[in-house]
Amino acid sequence: MKREVLVAINGLLAMTAFGGEIQDGVIRPSNKPNAVQQQMIARQYGMFIHFGINTFHNQEWTDGTQPPTSYNPKTVDTDQWAQTARDAGMKYVILTAKHHDGFCLWDSQHTDYDVANSPNKTDVVAALAASCKKYGIQMGLYYSLWDRHEPTYKDDKKYVAYMLKQLTELLTDYGPVCELWLDGGWDKRRENWDIPGVYALVKKLQPECAVGVNWTIGLPDNPDAKNVKPDQQKEGFPIRYFPSDFRLGDPYLPGDPDPKLFSHDGQLFYLPFEATVCLNGKWFFNTRDSQLKTLGELESLFKRATAQDNILILNSPPNRDGVMTEGNVKQLKALAERLGLH
C-alpha cells in the first residue's frame, strides 16, 4: 500500500508541490517532476550573486564579529547585475541575503547586523527585486541556516523562531521569490533545523518557490552522512533534508547518469540537481583573486550541468564598488554567444 506524506507541519498547511501530485493536502511520491520542478528545469541557467560583508575582508567566511560599518560599497548597482544576467542568457539570479556571518542585506526587524547599520543603507534585496522585474528575470535568495552572529543561535527553539521571522520578511516584502537556497546545515544535527517547518512556511507564503538545502542526500546506512557528492549518489539514497524540491552539493557537477529518485519513509521522490560553480576562484570578490574560467571550461560546465533536466547557477560576485567586474561581464556575454543563448 502506497504511503503518503502530510504537508500539515507545525500547524502550517502548505499547498506544496514536493515530489509530485497534491490531493487533499497530501504529498504523493512521484517519479517525474512536478510543476515547481518543471519551472526550475525550464529556467536551466542562472547567476549566483555572493555579496556582503565578506566582500570587504577578502574572506569567504567571516565569523560574525566584523562590524557592520565595514560593509561599505561605493554603490549597489543591481541594475548592472540583473542586466548582466539577462544578457548572459540567464533566467534568474540568487542573492546571498544572509551568509554564515549573519549579516543581512536587507533591513531586518530582528537584528541590527544588517545594511541599515552600515554606511550604505541600500536594501539590496529590494533593489535587486526591482532590477529583476525591470530586466525580465526572476529572483531567488540564499539564506544560511548557520549564523555566527545571532545570539539565539545556541538555543535551537529560539533560533528556529528567529529564522522563520526573517524568512517571513524575505518572502512577504519583496515580491515573488523563485527559489530559496539554504546552506550551512552541517553545523548542527539535521533535526535541529526543523526543515519541515521551514518548508511549510515557505510554501504557505510562496507556493511556487523551490526549496533546497545544501548536501541534500545521505547514505543508505547513514541518512545523515555529510558530503555525499552527486556522482556518488544512486537511486533510492535517503533525503537528508526532507522535504526538499531539488538537490544541492556545491561546487560539484551532477553524475552521468544522474539519478533522480530519492527516498523518504520508504517512498521515492523526484529531485533534480542544481549545480553551483564559481566563474572566478572565489565565491565572494577578493582583491587577490585573479582567476577567471576560460570559455572552453565554461562551455563544458554548462553542457554537463544542464543536461539530464538539471540546472546551473554560475557565481559572479560584485566587487567593493558594488558592480560586477568588466572581465566577468565580457566573459558571461561571450559564453552566451558561444552557446547561442541570445
Image (cartoon, helix red, strand yellow):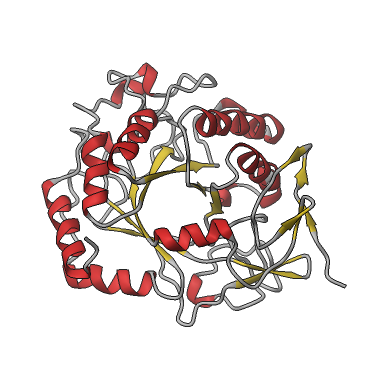
Task: Please indicate whether residue 277 sits to the left or right of residue 199 in the image.
Answer: left
- Asked whether residue 166 is in view, the answer is yes
Using the rendered view, name the quadrant where residue 264 is placed.
Answer: bottom right
In depth, the one of 59 and 88 nearer the eye is 88
Q: Is residue 312 above or below residue 71?
A: below
Estimate the x, y position of residue 274 in percent, counting from the top left: 45, 62
The residue at the point 52 percent across, 55 percent down is 214
Left or right: 208, with 305 as reference point: right
| Residue 316 against residue 143 in the figure, above or below | below
Q: Quadrant of the N terminus?
A: bottom right
Residue at the bottom extreme, as displayed: 257
Of residues 99 and 336, which is closer to you in this image?
336
Rendering quarter of residue 11: top right
Asked where in the image residue 50 lies, by quadrant, the reply is: top left
For the C terminus, the image quarter is: bottom left
Q: Residue at x 44, y 39 (%)?
A: 99
Determine the residue positioned at 46% across, 40% down.
100
The residue at the point 78 percent across, 45 percent down is: 8
